[in-house]
Amino acid sequence: MKILTVLTYYRPHTSGLTIYAERLAEAFAWRGHEVTVLTSHFDKSTPAQEIRNGVKIVRAPVLFRVSKGVIMPTFGWLAWKYVAESDVVQMHLPQFDAPGFATRARLLGKLSILTYHCDLLLPDGLFNWLVNQVVHFQNHSAALLADHIVTYTQDYADNSPFLSRYKHKLSPILPPVQLPPAQQSAIEGFAQKYNTAQNRPVIGMATRFASEKGVEILLEALPALFARYPNAQVLFAGQHQNVMGEEAYFARLAPQIREYEAQGKWRFLGTLNPAEMAAFYPNLDLLVVPSLNSTEAFGLVQIEAMMNNVPCVASALPGVRRPVQMTGMGKVAPIGDFAKLAESMLQILGDPAAYRRDPAEIARPYNPDSVAAEYEKLFARLKK
């Protein structure tokens, strides 16, 4: 089967959406499908075309950016070419160009699937409001034209104003989660580098530094944590500088973070590759996901942590709360409530054995091969 995957940003951009798309595309290729990813050439250091892990990646030239979106003059022509060559068109939303691809798929008799990752909620301001309205219109247009919609959990679907309108053609499929095996030497090297043996407990946060991620909620919860555990430290894995659209947010929180950095209680690790992430998780006592709004639909890092027997505290957002609820490996804290976040962290750290489960059992349904198989079942059902 020829599968065309369409999304605005792909590697080297790092987000939950791009990681999902990459894992699924490579799983399709491993299962024998011919997979093409059509995306933007936002990073000029990458080639316009390449084949990586069996997946053909085609990057369209970017003329300029509008907020977090990109304008690609040749994207329409490329859309006709690659949709015509494909059996299935899989689009990752939110995405401005999705209606055009869904229209082409319908006109050319191709199966079209939307994978809806999250709502788009840009910061306040007239321009961002206009961008939100345009993207919402584009998403609804794509949803009307597409054959089917996939999202991570029924919990998120039931609580999403967007998805709740398309229940008649919607299926939840758990997301693909995968890490390379953790090498003991790498784990020990990480521990030595960041002094995790002495400075415990270690609280992890793995995400981009963005306003919807709730970094300030963790910062406000830390005094209670440090009062109980004076040697605790926070390790932040992910891009924290020059995050598109988040410069002002980082500048606002930077003074408080700098104080903790000076005390050795906060470390920025930068963006870690998969092998480094595999060494990161075993060095944690706890992972926090204090996200604030529906731009977060699940939190793949929770499953990565749980696969390493690390419990989590997640906010009570629809979808985000499900990994903890399904596994029992942690606590769910009210959205934006730093006192409850601190209380939940302290409860887990006080009795960690109560929140441990079998990592192999947790990992099984999230294996990319298993997720790709679920998509294949959906394709077969829709083609009947």
Image (spheres, grey):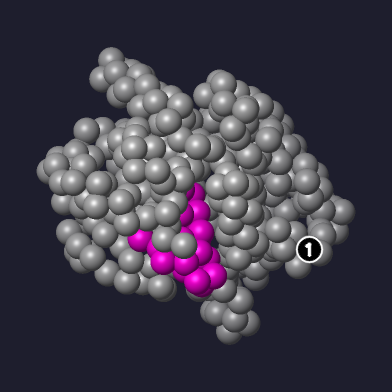
36 vs 239, nearest the viewer: 36
Identify the residue at image location x=36%, y=27%: 138
The furthest residue to the bottom: 185
Q: Is residue 200 above or below residue 150?
A: below
Magenta residue span: 14-36
Identify the residue at image location x=81%, y=48%: 328
**x and y percent of residue 259 in the render?**
45, 45
The furthest residue to the top: 126
344 vs 113, nearest the viewer: 113
Answer whether residue 300 is visible to the viewer in this image: no
Q: Is residue 70 left or right of residue 158?
A: left
Answer whether residue 110 is visible to the viewer in this image: yes
184 vs 135, nearest the viewer: 135
**x and y percent of residue 238 in the render?**
44, 54
Q: Is residue 262 above or below residue 118?
A: below
Dominant SS in magenta: helix
